[in-house]
Amino acid sequence: MPDFYFASMSPPCRAAHLVAKAVGVDLNLKPLDLSKGEQNDPDFVAINPQHCVPTLVDGDLTLWESRAICTYLASQYGKSDSFYPRDPKTRARVDRLLYFDMGTLYDRFGKYAYPVLFGGERPDPAKLEKLHEALGWLDDLLAGSSWAVGDRFTVADCVLVASVSSFEAGGIDLGSYGRITTWLEKCKTSLPGYEEVSAQGLAIFGGFAREKLSK
């Protein structure tokens, strides 16, 4: 059983945990309280010198970077290739969304939200506008298919929903994005283990983010 070091309020951690649920692999859950600096404990730093979460230890493999963990779990434990398709063109479409989430969508949310949540700054309307631009692109990318890529959920849905659900919990208005809101509700009701994985972390995140980001 792989060891999984995580913080429930972290969207990247929830993404990897959702992938594990989707492929049916049990994880030995090892929560870290980031507010107490547990990620800096010497025992954890010995495992991951970057002392970041999520971190996965599966036998002789120690892995961090959430999207790498997601694709590893899908490749190693997936019972078919539908969740992380082997077909090069379909996989490229999935990978595109993983990179889009990392380099554009979640990146823009972080640049908007983190200075406010952790640096005491006031929300920057220009940064919020950039986030909405990225949400508009995602809304367009969701056109013409039931899920993020095609008619079955893939690892891309787990990664994207971890981000978008956090935006929603933090008070980001998604009402202008009809495809996103329809897809988001489908993820909430259809992805394996969604409520179990997401409820606590989203409640914690929304509890302090919504008020600060609304100022």
Image (cartoon, helix red, strand yellow):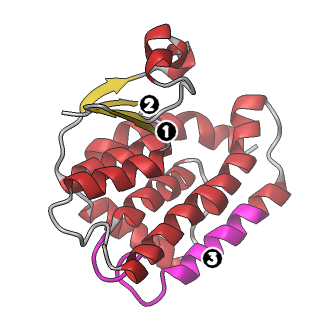
Magenta-span inclusion, residue 22: no
Is label 1 in a helix, a strand or a loop? loop
User: Residue 90's spot in the image, x, y percent?
Assistant: 39, 80
Q: CA distance from mark 2 to mark 3?
A: 29 Å
Label 1 sits on what residue type?
A: Ser
Quadrant of image for the C terminus: top right
In the picture, measured across the screen, residue 189 lies left or right of residue 67, that is: left
Label 3 sits on what residue type?
A: Trp
Residues tagged 2 and 1 counted as in contact (Cβ below 8 A): yes
In magenta, the rendered stretch is: 130-153
Magenta-span inclusion, residue 142: yes
Quadrant for residue 80, please give it: bottom left
Is residue 119 among the parts visible in the rendering? yes
Is label 3 in a helix, a strand or a loop? helix
Q: CA distance from mark 2 to mark 1?
A: 6 Å
Is label 2 in a helix, a strand or a loop? loop
Label 2 sits on what residue type?
A: Ala
Residue beneath label 1, please? 10
In the picture, measured across the screen, residue 138 lies left or right of residue 93, that is: right
Quadrant for residue 71, please give it: bottom left
Q: Which numbered dot is residue 137?
A: 3
Tell me what residue is drawn at x 44 percent, y 57 percent. Answer: 159
Is residue 176 among the parts visible in the rendering? no
Quadrant of image for the N terminus: top left
* Residue 183 to residue 53: above or below: below
* Residue 92 to residue 168: above or below: below
Q: Quick one: 48 or 101, which is closer to the camera?
A: 48
Residue beneath label 2, please? 7
Q: CA distance from mark 3 to mark 1?
A: 23 Å
Quadrant for residue 156, please give it: bottom left
Farthest residue, direction top? 42
